[in-house]
Each structure stands twice: as structure tokens, then as C-alpha cells.
Amino acid sequence: MPDLKAAYNFTDTFGGLMLAGHSIGVLTAGLISGVLPLYLGNKKSILILFAMAFIGAFLLIISNWSSLLLILGFALIGLGRGSLLNFNTRTVNILTNGSAAAANILHSMFAMGAIAAPILFYLVNKISGWRVWLVIIIFLGIAALYRLFKANMPNYKASSKNYDLSFLRDKKFLIKAGMIFFYICAEYALLGWLVTYMNYKNFLNSSQFVSSMLWVVIFAGRLLCAAFASKFKVKNFILIASIGSSLFFAGLLLSENISSVFICVACLGLSMAGLAPMIYADANYYSINYQLANGTLVFASAIGGAIMPFAVGVMADLGGFNYGMAAILFAFVLLIIFAALNLILDHE
């Protein structure tokens, strides 16, 4: 974000709009990635939708032609990312019958990429600039698409059950949708604005390191969750982790030196690590039995991911970055409320 902002000279509000564009792409993925395989088949659908991410990366390279290409590029990246998230999550849930350990291992792979990306970006950016980094990403994407093209995978067959939306009347499902909504509100806004916030706090030399450290901790936390998933109840874990995330994020906002920032970010990463995979695992009954349920969760999360990063950018322009980042705490508090309701409904 700082490099794009420097290259194209846009405001924090427009930066928030770009992040919202990414989430709108994820939202669109939630709508169509569950339905498109019924018509085109599983493989064709995921190949087409996944390819959108790398078309989006190309648009960022040439976006000096039009500022709207920045938003479109982020939206296409979100479309590819959201489609792959839906496909992977549903596939793992089906293959493992909703194993929380398997969900954490899957999401650990996401974290592994997020750990490597800021470090590699920093090195490439220093040598050749951020556009070269995007070219590398595009070539890696082409390789991944080729590997996916060669893979064997089953195709879905259309039936009345594929379009069953009765889960939308189930209050337990709606609570889970609320949890993933508010979690992604907080996650997208935090990850989208963390480096900019660190720069705002004059921690310029540590910003990329803190971003990578957060993902290292999230990666380690997800592996720990995978190892000990059978030792605790998923709903209890979600509530405790939600409370911890809220407390440590508040600590981050109050931190005035780099040491306390490191401590709060590390603890925040551990608290957040298992939340998304655990919420998806907690919803395994719905994702296994309803073709459109997992896409609906992705859709709900994308709405949150579209709203909060944009809101942070607007509030930062209006009242300063501390004011903007404080809005994320509101999402964490609401996550706690929904996690508590999730636990209460379990006893009904």
C-alpha cells in the first residue's frame, strides 16, 4: 500500500476504497464460486476464477493509465482469492468431515505465503521495484494454474439440493456468519493498514518486519491449533481467542515504543491464529450438507472485509490514524458478542 500510494499519489480514503474493492471481489466469489461449478464443472470454474487474481495483478502494473484500474485490479485479486478460499475450505471439510486440525493446517499454508511475501517483496522492491514483484507473482500464478489444470478433481452435478438455502433460516448458521463477518472486518483492516499505521507511528524501519512477524506468529499458532484441536472445544476456543484478540489489539493501539508493539503484535497474532479456520470448522455441518453454505460464509466475510478497511481510511482522513485504527476494536468487541452467542446456542 505505501508503494502504491507513493507511485499514484492517492489519499487514505482512496486506499481504503482499493481495499474495499478487494473485498468486493471476495464477496463476488462467495456468490458465484459455489454456483459456477454446477454449470462449467469444478475444474473449469476454479481455473477461470483463480486466473482473475493474476489479471488483477497485471492491472496494478499498468494502472497509471487510470486510477479506476487500481480498484478493478484489487477486485479481481479478491475474486481469485475468495474463489480459491471457498474451493479449498469446502474440499478440506468434505475430505476430513470437518476436522478442525485439517482446517488449521490448510490456513497455515495461507499464513506461510503471507510470511514469505513481505520479506521477498522487500528484497525485490529494493533491487528492482514493486512492479517487478508483481511480474514474479504473475509467473508463479501461471505455474499454479498449470498445476491445477493437470490435477484430477470431481465435478459437481446440479440438483435441487445444490440450491437449498434453508440454512439461511438457521440461527446457528447466522451466528457463525456473524462471527466470520466481524473477524474478517478486523483482520482485513488490520493487515491492510498495519504497515501504514507503523509508518504513521514513525516505526519506519520495523514496519515490514512487524507485518512478517505477525504472519509468523499466526502460522505457528495455526500449527499449534492443528496439533491440539482435539484437546479443546471449538466454540470455547473461539470465544477465548476473540477476547484475547480484542485485548492485545487495544494494547497495540496504546503502545508508544517498538518493544511493546512487538509484544502486542505477537500476542495478537497468536490470539487471531486459529479464529478463521475454527469458525469454518465449526460450520462444517453446513458446508458439507449445503453446496452454497461455504460460499455464503465467504460472502459474509467479504462484506465485512469491504466495509472496515474503507471505514478505517475515511476515519483516518477525518481524525487521524489513531482514530481510524480504533474503529477496528469495535469489530473485535462485536466478535466477542457473537462468539458468546455461539456458545450459548450450543447449550439450547
Image (tube, rainbow, N blue to C red):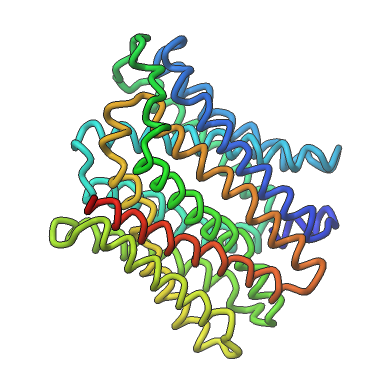
Which of the pair 263/142 is nearer the observer? 263
Q: Residue at x 71, y 74 (%)?
A: 323
As displayed, is residue 193 above or below residue 30?
below
**Residue 159 on image: x %, y %:** 35, 9
Residue 84, how many percent across, how many down?
Answer: 45, 34
Left or right relative to 39: residue 274: left
Q: Which residue: 42% across, 75% down?
A: 266
Residue 161 image point, x, y percent: 33, 15
Q: State the image quarter where residue 61 is shown.
A: top right
Instruction: Please determine whether, in this image, residue 139 is positioned above or below residue 3.
Output: above
Look at the image and tell me in which quarter the N terminus lies: bottom right
**Residue situated in front as seen by the camera: 120 or 326:** 326
Q: Quadrant of residue 86?
A: top left
Q: Residue at x 32, y 68 (%)?
A: 240
Where residue 320 appears, x then y in whole percent? 77, 74
Residue at 46 percent of width and 77 percent of height? 248
Asked if residue 292 is positioned above or below residue 204 in the image, the reply reads above
Q: Looking at the image, how many numbered discs can be counted on the residues?
A: 0
Kindly give the residue lying farthest to the left in the view shown.
231
